[in-house]
Amino acid sequence: MKVIAEQIYPEKYEVFQHILERDILSPHAGPDPVHSTSAATETVDRLSGDESTPEGIQASFFANAFRKRLQGEFSDLDNLYLLPDQGQQIQMFNFMAQKFPVVRYAQEILNNAYLEDLKGQTEALIWDIGIGNGQQIVRLIDAWRKTGEPLPLRMTVIGLDPSESSLSQAEQALGKVCGTAGIELSFVSLPKTVEALTEEDWLQLDALLAPMAGQWLANASFALHHIQPVSLRDAFFSRLKSNRPARFGMIEPYADFLTDNLQQRFANAWHHYGLSFWAIDQIDAPAENKNLLKSVFFGREILDVIAKDEGRIEQFETGEMWSERLQKAGFQLDLPQGLPASIPGFPAVGVQSFGQYIGFTAKAFPVISILLAR
């Protein structure tokens, strides 16, 4: 993975690298970061002082993560998804849908591929891994209606998500769109993460999927990088493949956060978030909205990636790494054709084939991977 971290705000990048080498990774720092020098903490505090510029915002997020690491404050209790945000995440989801169409367009690429497999089916089955509130599948059904192709009589949607409230919202949204389309919906709710699936859960899934072998679809949008331990990802792909989906699609951030080398992980994070923030800065919107978007969706991730070594939640992989896992499980990779060179309506983010996956790029470097497999 080629990174250009040293070219993104190079002066601040060098200061952070120096703190890593001198105060966190050097022998005198000791195994416990709480023993690092107070001078390093003071330097970090100065780096977090200016949030009036894009450079200052990025430095502030990383300074917060370095401070927590130096002072030993970050614990497993700091679960990124349990911290309150006063409704900011919902606000920013709406903002992203209107102004930053990256996620939506990635899902449209997958949905367009799924439509090819669904043509002519009178009964459809989709397993959405990390379904959230179900909007991707809602849009898939809407797109199917617009094609003029016959719709299925029945549709089964298996929703896997740790949030029961999200699953409830997904069931309601899908029930509404299916009712309008005249489709009989069966919604199977699995309020779990992938790693929490028991053998009994898998047997239930096997029973649902077996009658539709070679016809059903699997979808995972920004969900699989949370699977812990990482070794379970290969086992998951193998079990998924054994149930013979017609197509499996996934969207993931592009970065290597699996490495145990903190210097390399920091460089990868500075590169990934620097490019992502640059793309966000191209939005035609007030600076406070763009900064809030960075904070709500990425500020907590940076804490997780930098502040601790064990139990990290944000375990991103590159498109090449995911491709290797899929092929190891027996999947054949399949690239969509005829895509534009950039996201429609948002030319700052490119759309490029990297041989085994589609990459959404910022300054020609991938920041999101889209993979399709059979």
Image (spheres, grey):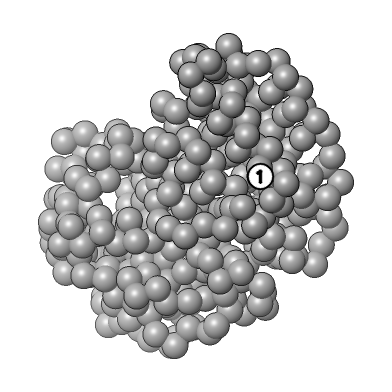
The answer to whether residue 309 is left or right of residue 47 is left
Report how many numbered discs are placed on residues in the image. Answer: 1
Closer to the camera in the image, 244 or 67: 67
Closer to the camera in the image, 17 or 286: 17
Position of residue 226 measured from the top left corner of the image (x, y, whole percent) = 40, 41
| Label 1 crowd bin: few (<14), some (14–19), many (20+), radius 10 Å | some
Find residue 13 and report its image quarter. top right
The answer to whether residue 218 is left or right of residue 142 is left
Find residue 203 and report its image quarter. top left
The answer to whether residue 56 is left or right of residue 120 is right
Q: Is residue 356 above or below residue 125?
A: below
Q: Residue at x 68, y 38 (%)?
A: 15
Position of residue 287 measured from the top left corner of the image (x, y, whole percent) = 83, 54
Looking at the rendered structure, the secondary structure element under dot 1 is helix
Q: Residue at x 48, y 35 (%)?
A: 262
Q: Quadrant of the C terminus?
A: bottom left
Q: Is residue 346 visible?
A: yes
Q: Quadrant of the N terminus?
A: bottom left
Position of residue 350 measured from the top left corner of the image (x, y, whole percent) = 57, 75
Q: In the image, what residue type sits under mark 1?
A: Tyr
Position of residue 117 measured from the top left corner of the image (x, y, whole percent) = 29, 77
Q: Residue at x 60, y 38 (%)?
A: 17
The answer to whether residue 285 is left or right of residue 211 is right
Say which residue label 1 marks.
13
Q: Residue at x 18, y 57 (%)?
A: 328
